[in-house]
Amino acid sequence: MNIAANLEQVRHRIARVATREVKLLLATKTVSAEHIRTAIDLGATLTGENKIQELSAKWPLLQDTGAEFHFIGHLQSNKIKEAVKYASCIQSVDRIDLIHQLDRRLQAEGKRIDIFLQVNTSFEPSKFGVAPEAAMQLAQEAAKYDTLKVKGLMTIGLFSAEQEKVRRCFRLLKTTAGQLQQLGLPNADFGELSMGMSGDLETAIEEGATMVRVGTAIFGQRQYADSYYWNEKGA
Ligand SMILES: *Cc1c(COP(=O)(O)O)cnc(C)c1O
């Protein structure tokens, strides 16, 4: 694995389709702290973990880098304390009780955190995220709390070789963000669209992604199937 060459190639892929700034977040599940550090030394500034155990294990080894740690996996209620301790942004807020629990914890710590609302745009029951039509209610709830700064929406596109179906997911996220922006909620902005991964980042950028989350194309294949991370069994 050549992280430098891979990173260069991913940056090239982004630049080829981007007409505005697109941030690159390293999706670092199962990747060692050493390999993550290599990518950070090459200029990466954003990382995202899916499991709190991995986040809390790697954070002490990498906090000196100054990189930002996002949480992009399913957040269980009993892991909120650690999530808030290590992550500066939680991209996977997908339910009202999580909003309440996050607020309670953040109040206790006197902290604020950035959040993205995770929307299920592929309508696959195996994936987390609020249904697009329920995103408004979630956004309205999140906007009530000063501890939470809503920055945008996150989605995982459909896994399919059919580009048009994948594209539809990303387009739906953009449309949903536009609708939420029009509500003019206090304390909430929907400008950030976190969408696109190793296999579909070009499509996501064409549909308005402001941040892509890339793992495999930089760090190589993982041992576990993504379903391990994305459904209830893996959570
Ligand atoms: C693993 C993961 C990614 C990156 O996927 P790759 O195909 O490895 O680039 C992006 N987002 C989330 C939520 C992930 O779990």
Image: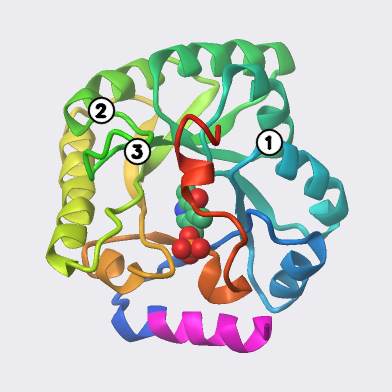
Q: Nearer the viewer, mark 1 or mark 3?
A: 1
The residue type indicated by label 1 comes to: Ile
Residue for badge 3: 189
Give the left or right position of residue 76, taking residue 154 as reference. Answer: right
* Residue at image coords 53%, 36%: 114
Residue for badge 2: 135
95 inside magenta stretch:
no
Task: Pick the quarter of the image with the C terminus.
Answer: top right
Compared with residue 161, is residue 235 higher up or lower down, i.e. above or below? above
2 inside magenta stretch:
yes
Task: Kindly report the secondary structure that dominates the magenta region of the rendered protein.
Answer: helix
* Residue at image coords 81%, 56%: 62
Compute the Cα span from label 2 to label 3.
13 Å
Q: Is mark 2 within 8 Å of ligand 1?
A: no
In front here: 192 or 71? Answer: 71
Kindly state the secondary structure of the residue where label 2 is placed. Answer: helix
Task: Pick the quarter of the image with the N terminus.
Answer: bottom right
Q: Position of residue 89 (x, y in %)?
A: 57, 40
Compared with residue 95, is residue 68 higher up or lower down, i.e. above or below? below
In the rendered structure, which disc, 1 or 3, sits on the residue that comes first in sequence? 1
The residue type indicated by label 2 comes to: Ala
Name which quarter of the figure residue 101 lies in: top right
In front here: 206 or 155? Answer: 155
Name which quarter of the figure residue 222 lies in: bottom right
Q: Which residues are magenta?
A: 1-13
Residue for badge 1: 52
